[in-house]
Image: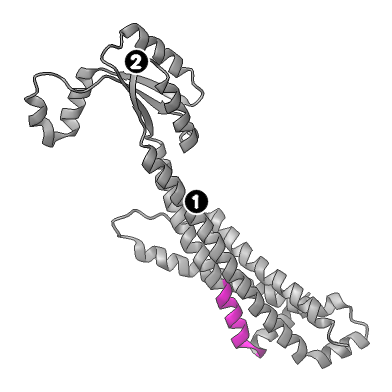
Amino acid sequence: MMYALREALTAFRRAPVLTGLSAAMIALSLFVVGLFGLVAHNVREVIQRVESRVQVVAYLRDDANSAEVNEAQRQIGTYEEVAGVRYVSREEALAIAKQELDELSGIFGNLESNPLPASIEVSLKSGQTGADAVRGVADRLRNFRFVEDVRYGDDWIEKIFVLRRVAAMASLTLGAGFAAVAALIIGAAIRMAVFARRDEITIMRLVGATDAFVRRPFIIEGLITGLIGAVLAVLATWLVFRSLIGSPFEIQWLPASWLYAGVAAGALVGLLASMVAVRRHLREIV
């Protein structure tokens, strides 16, 4: 193993340009994934904060009686997705509006009658605030006779979830494309290294060296190249993250598990590319 590691490190000195280019392409591919991952992670954090405040509000007709409303509250409280149910009277709704909409307090004060309806506010359990769950609760609330309208911000909920899916798909697609290019470059570097050492490899085979022994330095070379590229990608992503600190938006750094996965992905790309390349090109050496 020490011989294979020593030979792999020697190969970096023999072809520094190709090795550097291979590592750079892996770094670029994972850097793109890292940037989109940074966006996706922060979008997810925003969604989770928004989801914690998601409510389904059912606005009641004026002819709703207290018995019906109380029974509805009891039934809604038994829903699997529901964490709490709160009745807001017309008077309370007006008081809240005056408090939260200070610029309209003068208008509310001059009204002869209260134009705001009573409502039932439904808060959802953690993990039950996805678009489908919220929509399902809203649909059931509409079935009550005395419910005039149900609101839960369906438009922006859908847009946020679409944004998260698009960011994830874009990062995976672009990252895979750059990873494929990196694998091709690593394969080319391995091919040149194999042919540069073809006389040495032939002699090693003549004295009994197995193909596994011959391949091992090249495989380790690809693994190290992938690791270097992954570390460079993490560093570049961190520099971008640092440059965004102090911006109007609060940015959070990637979870440690994501960083470990990125480094492992870089090493895996280098390892697989070198294994395929060296297996194929060694066959061309008799």
Q: Which residue is drawn at 72% across and 75% down?
A: 274
- Asked whether residue 187 appears in the rendered view, the answer is yes
The stretch in magenta equals 14-26
Q: In this view, does 63 lie to the left or right of 71?
A: left
Helix, strand or loop under label 1 = helix
Q: In this view, does 235 lie to the left or right of 150?
A: right
Q: Residue 85 at x, y = what percent?
A: 38, 20
- All told, the count of numbered labels is 2
| Above or below: residue 38 compared with residue 224 | above
Q: Residue 135 at x, y = what percent?
A: 45, 32
Quadrant for the C terminus, please: bottom right
Determine the main secondary structure of the stretch shown in magenta.
helix
Q: Is residue 191 left or right of residue 96?
A: right
Q: Which residue is drawn at 38% across and 64% down?
A: 242
| Above or below: residue 52 compared with residue 164 | above
Chain-order first, disc 1 or disc 2: 2
Which residue matches tag 1? 165
Which residue matches tag 2? 146
Residue 15 magenta-drawn?
yes
Instruction: Look at label 1 and name its amino acid.
Output: Arg
- Nearer the observer, 62 or 199: 62
